[in-house]
Each structure stands twice: as C-alpha cells, then as structure tokens.
Image (cartoon, rainbow, N blue to C red):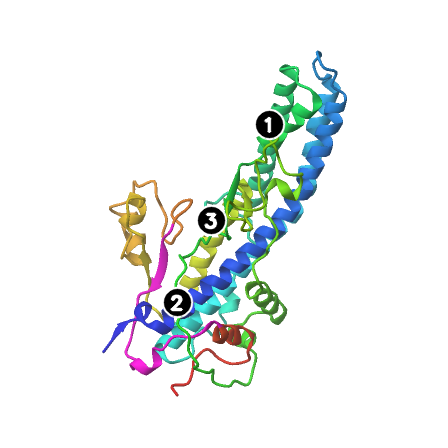
C-alpha cells in the first residue's frame, strides 16, 4: 500500500539525524563568528580605553579624541569583515550540500533505490546575497556599524553625565548586544526527537560517496568533519569571551558561568550577524532539499507549517501546499501579498519545513529507521545510500 515518503520511518529518522548534523555545522559556524567578533570587541575596547583616558572629569571629550574613537572602531570593523564574510558564505554552501546529499539519501532509503547522482554540481558557488536579496557583505558591515554607533553613544553619554572612566567603560559594556543564556545551543531546524536505534547495515560500494554525488572530495571531508564533530563548548558571544564577569554597582555578578543549579551555561549574544546567518542557513537547507528532490524525480515538495497561536498568516495559508501551488498562487490570488516566499523560511524565526510530495510502495521491512552510528557510516563511507533488507 502506497504511503507518503515523509511518513516512512526511514525518511523521518534519517532527516532527523541530518538536522542534528546540520545543527552541529551551524554551531561551528557560530563559534567561528564568535571568535572573530571577540577580536573585534577587544579592538573596540582598546579604542574606548584610549579615548576615555583623555577625558578629564568635568569637561567634554576632546573633538580629536571623538574622531579617533570613531575611526579606530571603523577600522577594526573593516578588519573583521573579510573573516566574517568567508565564514558566512562557506558555511551556507556547506549547509546546502549536506542538506541536498542527505535528502537524496533519505528519499533513496524510502523508495529502495539510489537517487541523487551528481547533486553536488547544483550547489551554489560563492553566495553574495542573503535570502531576502540583500548584500551579505553590506549587512555584515551595517551590523558592525550599529555596534560602533552604540559604543560611541555610550561614551558620549557617559562624558555628558560627567562620569568617571570606570563608569563610562561599564556603560559601554552594557551597550553591547544583549546576552541570552541557554543550557545548550538552540535548535533552529526541528525540535529534538527520539531516534530509533537499528542494526541495519549499508550495502557495500566500489567508490566514494562524494564522487557519486558529484561533490569535491576535500570539501565533503570538511563538511563531514564539522557536521559530525561535537558541538563547540566555549561560551559564545558572552562578555566572558572578552571581559571579566560583569558586575553591578553592588558587586553582584550579572553574567554567570553557571546556572542556579550549578550547571554550565552557554552564553549567546544576540548578534545581528548571527541572526542573519541563521535565517540564511535555514533557507539554504530548504533549497538543498528542494533541488535534491527534483534530482530524485520527486514531483514537488510540500510546505509544512507548525500551526499554533504563533503561526502567522503567511505560513498558515501555505501549510499543505506544494511549492508549485504556492508559486502559482503568488501569480494570481496572492499577487498583492507582501509575503513572497516559495520555500521556508518565510520570515525571521520561521519554523516551517519541507517534505517530498511523493509516495512509496516499498514493504514495511524497509521502513525500520536508522541509528546515529549508521548515519555516521553513511557520511564517512564509500557506499551508496540504500540499505539491504536483511
């Protein structure tokens, strides 16, 4: 009896493990960005300390010192942009490749035959625009410019209020991006789900998986290394990456390394760059899924929304429609809609996903799921995607 591919256990478990690997890739990119931004912040603080050292309490900050502060922070941002841009664009390409390769493998397992030959040739080259069509480099520079303006405003306000050097530095630290604390890195693709363990093995193959998919061997090895590595454990974007613990005027620590129960906390700064990166990450994952499905001969992909009191009209009315149906409606009934998304994300913090619009008649004994160990073997092995039935 035919049933939707997306409802088979083999597809569900494989894509769940795929999302877990992608989240690790995402965490690694954020850690790399964090390191670059920490260097940027250290340079900013150096410029602030130099400017504040020239401040005499009871007087305004000299004009030349204000100019030096502005120019110094701007130059620091220019030094940071190339590294941030490289991390950003390489991560998006890797996300597309891993999403496409594993979508092809998941479909292969559901239908019982290998698909996705040469999918790597469809991967985007060097991306220059965000999923909303803006310049990636421009958005990175704007984000750093906002930090620069916030820091300068904090310094100027402290001087205007005739504060001492330490008070001004404290004000600058409070002007930096807000800290959000999580016990573990937040997931942006899907909620955690239990993964069924299975002892099913892979069929042997005579050539590398990367060759069959048309992905450069060195690039695939780098993707797998990042995707299967443990999540980075250092604090991300928290003041602890640059400062000693931040305390209030009564000496109470405002940013802690442990939660109330003494458990380690991963600190996440609300950096605009990383918010942009996350949205583009989700977009490239969905685009990779879509291209892999097309390559596998799947008719289309279905938009699946999370329907609750947080779901907006853009996502709710797309729920259950194929990408072709959405594209058609955007030319007719929805031609005046502000929301123009054909694949998720439709907006920032979009929780929607895609699933193949196809069915399989493979017997139930193929529908037994996979284990994390098997997913790892798939990523590292020379074997094709389809498993044996025994």
Residue 364 part of the magenta segment? yes
* 177 relative position to 47: left or right: left
Q: From mark 3 to mark 1, how far is it between C-alphas?
A: 39 Å
Badge 2: residue crowd in 10 Å (few <14, some 14–19, many ≥20): many
Residue 332 screen position, x and y as percent: 26, 47
Question: 151 or 81, which is in the foreground?
Answer: 151
Badge 3: residue crowd in 10 Å (few <14, some 14–19, many ≥20): many
Badge 3 vs badge 2, beta-carbon distance below 8 Å: no
Residue 382 versus residue 22 in the image, above or below: below
Q: Which mark is residue 302?
A: none
User: Which residue is outermost to the top?
Assistant: 58
Q: From mark 3 to mark 2, how far is it between C-alphas?
A: 21 Å
Residue 222 screen position, x and y as percent: 61, 65
Looking at the rendered image, the disc whose residue lies closer to the viewer, 1 or 2, is: 1
Picture quadrant where residue 70 is located: top right
Disc 1 target residue: 250
Q: Which mark is residue 293?
A: 2
Q: Secondary structure at mark 3?
A: helix
User: Which residue is outermost to the left?
Assistant: 1
């Amino acid at each position: 009896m035919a049933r939707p591919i997306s409802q088979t256990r083999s597809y569900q478990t494989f894509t769940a493990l795929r999302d877990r690997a992608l989240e690790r890739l995402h965490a690694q990119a954020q850690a790399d960005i964090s390191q670059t931004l920490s260097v940027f912040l250290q340079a900013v603080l150096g410029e602030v300390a130099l400017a504040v050292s020239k401040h005499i309490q009871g007087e305004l900050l000299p004009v030349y010192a204000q100019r030096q502060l502005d120019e110094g922070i701007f130059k620091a941002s220019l030094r940071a942009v190339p590294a941030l841009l490289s991390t950003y664009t390489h991560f998006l390409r890797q996300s597309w490749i891993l999403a496409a390769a594993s979508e092809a493998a998941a479909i292969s397992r559901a239908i019982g035959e290998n698909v996705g030959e040469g999918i790597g040739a469809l991967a985007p080259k060097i991306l220059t625009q965000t999923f909303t069509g803006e310049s990636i480099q421009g958005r990175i520079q704007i984000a750093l410019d906002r930090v620069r303006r916030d820091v300068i405003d904090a310094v100027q306000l402290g001087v205007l209020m005739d504060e001492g050097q330490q008070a001004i530095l404290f004000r600058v630290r409070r002007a930096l991006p807000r800290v959000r604390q999580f016990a573990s890195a937040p997931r942006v693709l899907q909620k955690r789900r239990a993964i069924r363990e299975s002892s099913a093995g892979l069929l042997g193959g005579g050539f590398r998986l990367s060759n069959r998919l048309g992905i450069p061997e060195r690039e695939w090895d780098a993707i797998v290394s990042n995707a299967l590595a443990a999540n980075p454990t250092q604090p991300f974007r928290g003041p602890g990456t640059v400062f000693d613990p931040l305390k209030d005027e009564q000496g109470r620590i405002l940013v802690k390394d442990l939660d109330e129960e003494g458990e380690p906390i991963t600190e996440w700064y609300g950096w605009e760059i990383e918010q942009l990166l996350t949205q583009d990450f989700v977009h490239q994952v969905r685009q990779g899924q879509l291209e892999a499905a097309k390559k596998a001969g799947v008719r289309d992909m279905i938009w699946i929304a999370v329907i609750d009191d947080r779901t907006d009209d853009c996502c709710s009315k797309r729920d259950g429609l194929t990408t072709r149906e959405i594209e058609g409606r955007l030319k007719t009934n929805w031609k005046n809609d502000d929301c123009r998304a054909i694949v998720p994300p439709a907006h920032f913090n979009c929780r929607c996903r895609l699933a193949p619009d196809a069915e399989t008649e493979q017997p139930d004994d193929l529908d037994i799921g996979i284990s994390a160990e098997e997913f790892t073997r798939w990523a590292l092995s020379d074997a094709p995607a389809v498993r044996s039935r025994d």
